[in-house]
């Protein structure tokens, strides 16, 4: 599971260190790296491990094969995903088009989102974080603990 928020420097070659706890989250999945793609929710990147891509593949496979949304998801997630292998120091090299999509310059903010993570420009993230906190406060009643077996109705 991806948790926490960490800001790391990006060097001139586009290399950035992936937080150690993020690396540990994908360590047992068979690929020594992460998958990253342009988000369709805004000017940031999304990413995760092999298991997340498999979950997305299963969800997309349930969609009608001729659904335009399915095609868009396949193109953005699978067609746009980059397998970024970890260097010995835990860094990955972000491709130029991904850096440009997210507006990244000298640093990147990694945000744990449970089963996935996001990579943001620090200024854009700071602006969004405030909006997210306000929204969460207004809608805290929507966060309910799921009922477990054996619990009353």
Image: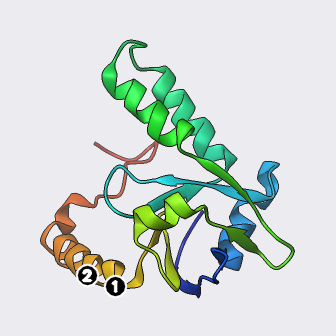
Residue 10's place in the image compared with 58, above or below, is below
The answer for how far apart the CA atoms under marks 1 and 2 are is 6 Å
Q: How is the image coloured?
A: rainbow
Using the image as rendered, state which of residue 17 and residue 53 is in the foreground: 17
Q: Quadrant of the C terminus?
A: top left
**Label 2 crowding class (10 Å Cα cut-off): few <14, some 14-19, many 20+?**
few
Q: Residue at x 60, y 62 (%)?
A: 1
Assess whether mark 2 and mark 1 are in contact (beta carbons under 8 angstroms).
yes
| Displayed quadrant of residue 20 | bottom right
- What is the secondary structure assignment of the residue under circle 2? helix
Q: Residue at x 42, y 61 (%)?
A: 101
Res 116 visible? no
Q: Residue at x 45, y 65 (%)?
A: 100
| Displayed quadrant of residue 65 | top left
Q: Horizontal placement of 62 versus 85: left or right? A: left
Residue 115's place in the image compared with 53, above or below, is below
Q: Horizontal placement of 62 versus 83: left or right? A: left
Residue 130's place in the image compared with 61, above or below, is below
Q: Residue at x 52, y 86 (%)?
A: 106
**Where residue 57 appears, x then y in whole percent?**
56, 31
**Where residue 51 appears, x then y in whole percent?**
65, 45
Res 112 visible? yes
- Return the residue at label 2: 127
**Where residue 46 appears, x then y in whole percent?**
48, 58
Q: Residue furthest right?
A: 88
- What is the secondary structure assignment of the residue under circle 1? helix
**Label 1 crowding class (10 Å Cα cut-off): few <14, some 14-19, many 20+?**
few
Mark 1 vs mark 2: give the one in front. 1
Q: Which mark is residue 9?
A: none
Count of number-bearing discs: 2
Q: Which mark is residue 123?
A: 1
Q: Residue furthest left?
A: 138
């Amino acid at each position: 599971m991806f948790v926490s928020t960490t800001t790391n420097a990006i060097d001139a070659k586009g290399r950035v260190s992936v937080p150690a706890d993020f690396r540990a989250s994908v360590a047992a999945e068979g690929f020594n790296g992460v998958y990253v793609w342009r988000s369709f929710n805004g000017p940031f990147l999304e990413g995760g491990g092999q298991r997340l891509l498999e979950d997305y593949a299963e969800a997309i496979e349930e969609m009608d094969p001729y659904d335009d949304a399915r095609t868009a998801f396949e193109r953005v997630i699978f067609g746009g995903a980059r397998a970024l292998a970890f260097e010995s120091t835990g860094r990955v090299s972000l491709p130029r088009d991904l850096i440009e999509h997210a507006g990244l310059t000298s640093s990147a903010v990694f945000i744990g989102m449970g089963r996935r993570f996001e990579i943001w420009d620090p200024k854009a993230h700071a602006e969004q974080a405030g909006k997210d906190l306000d929204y969460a406060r207004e809608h805290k009643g929507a966060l309910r603990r799921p009922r477990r077996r054996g619990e009353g109705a």
